Image: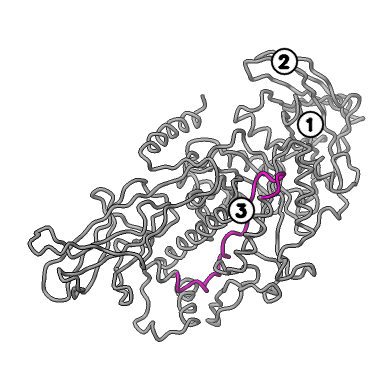
Amino acid sequence: MKKYEFVGLILAIFLVITTYSFNYFYDEVNNIVNPKYVSADNFTTNISIDSNSKLFNPLVIKTSKENYYRYELVEIFANYKDLNNDNINVGQLEAKIYKGNKLIETIGDMKSIMLKYNPKLKLWSGKWPIPYNPDLGQYQVLVRAMPSDPGPVITATYSFNILGRIPKKPDNGICATVLEYGGNVTEKKIIGPDGKYGDWHNIFKWVNFTGANSFFMLGAETETYNSRITPENPFDPGKLKEVDKLAAEAKKHDLKFGAWTMTFGIQGRDYKKIGYNPSLSYNSSTGALYPSYMHISLIDEKRFNDLLKVIKRFNANPDIDYIGFDYVRTGHADGYEMAEQVIGDMSIAVPNNWDEYDSNQRMTWFARQIKAKKDEEIIAKWQWWRAHKIAETINRLITMSGTKKPVWVFTLGWEHGKQHGQDPLMFTDAGISFDAVMLYEANQAQFRQVLVDWKAYVASQQVNIIVGQTVDVKLLDSSYLIPPQEFVRRVIIGTKKIAFGGLTDGLFWHDVSRALWGRKGNYSEKEWFLTAAKSFSDFRIEKGELGTIVNIKMRSDEFKKRIFFVDAIIENQTINQINDIMVKLIPTEGVDPLGKENIYLKKLSPGEIKIITFKAQIKPPSHKYRNQYMIAVSAETGQNQKTVNFQYVNPSKYYGKNIE
């Protein structure tokens, strides 16, 4: 047993124990049904009118629910009345939260909250944000009533629970090839693995080439400049039809199919055309608010209802296995139209003349504290509140759509999503089945920090995680590896190190369109798709889902003719015999097999190693190809049982030498 597997086992045992303490809730499906809230309107307190009772306490408190998930606000209600059921003159009601005897500090170093009196409802209330990744179990609210006039301080307590949800683990590791393309991909000519152009069916030739078991595609996006987009149809109907077509095709290839929507992100700035309200940004130079260029407000109910319709559409399609959300967040520097909600929920101190501020002044004041004054306490509360709001929105979408299909979200990697108001544990409690963590948009140093941030925050048994890397030569920087090699290194390290206690639950390769038409550099399409194939097989070997290991050794033969021998070293690492193995030398840019490209291996006994030798001719060194060519070998034992390895070689450097 490997070290991380042992640690994962110990952690899993611990989590099972806590589960039987009712702190964790295991959920077979996605939707979460929380107990009903007690609202301020129906909060009533029956106080015994027994003047002889020495146990009479004029202060009675209650929380809006008995059980809370980690994305929720704990709402506290209080009545403070005398024996005649009249309100007592009181100066302040202060609430503190304890776990056992320990005072719990929460977001923004908040040690207590002051309850506010509502004269219409004749009660006091306040909200307490649950700390990030809290200890689960029972908590106590302690409220202290401090009279305006001299008199005793009265206290009362009430208990509530913080729960955590753990979704069901997937039966096998998810290895997803992704297609993110805003236009209609079925209208494009697409090159295939054989180098010939064809229609959209070539996408599935590439997916099969990678050995993926899943295929995810962008299925719904709002492009305001698209003539087919209207307020009634905010998602391109042609794109939605493509989803149906590609989902049906995926089933023919025995692939799990996932469709995702761009939730609160749009392309184009014509919000009025669709009838949406933009998220508001702030200009520190002018002190003015302005519409975000690509984000819709999280509190836009039209957008929410439009999203609900498309999710119901995906849910009704039996060929769609997974439903995903991207851009389920604000931008890094917008969302200030929600200022008053944040201030009220998070006990943010405001100027004394706050009542004189109009709505725009309140939003501007809030934005200024974050963008111009860099108020750390308010920033911390803003980040938490956004994560709460986004998780709440996800929960509403899942429950109101009625879907039982696994739901995933794409999460930004930096600070485990906190910078943009995303939190994997909140998302999990809200009902997602797995979190697709984007390791990209990061250089080498930033990538290392992403892993540090996540591993310090979350354990592999708390949330299902799949990690992904993107095809982008600009970001795949390395002092000793070229971009395709660096791609594989990062994503495989991510599967092992992003969460404490074990491997992730899968990985995704991002994406088909970038490998075909993106910032791929001087590397061929096939080279990039081979990064997917090697990443998937390396992960599945680590997870114990593939039995063969493939290594490569090269020997030069005839210097002048640029002929090499390629030894494919095939090892059976299982305790069972493996039969019918097809070993292939994969033609790549600059490498032409001589003789057989495919060699059949009838069987491989447990622990046995065999060497299959191919002969190939390599083109002369070329600066266009960095003076390096990819040598790639695969061993296949059946559908989705494919082990791939590759290495790069500079032929002029290694002529006449063995290459390890």
Residue 161, given in percent of the width and then of the height, sits at 35, 49
Q: Nearer the viewer, residue 42 or 427?
A: 42
* Disc 2 and disc 3 in contact, CB within 8 angstroms: no
Q: Which residues are magenta?
A: 316-341
Q: Is residue 616 magenta?
A: no
**Badge 1 element:** helix
In the picture, residue 530 is in which quadrant? top right
Q: Is residue 333 magenta?
A: yes
Q: Are marks 1 and 2 in contact (CB under 8 Å)?
A: no
Question: Does 649 appear above or below 104?
Answer: above
Check disc 2 and report the residue beneath it.
604
User: What residue type is disc 2 on?
Assistant: Leu
User: Can you identify the residue that label 1 sits on?
Assistant: 654
Number of numbered discs visible in the structure rendering: 3
Please name whichever residue, 42 or 446, is drawn nearer the observer in this view of the structure: 42
Residue found at x 12% / y 62%: 50
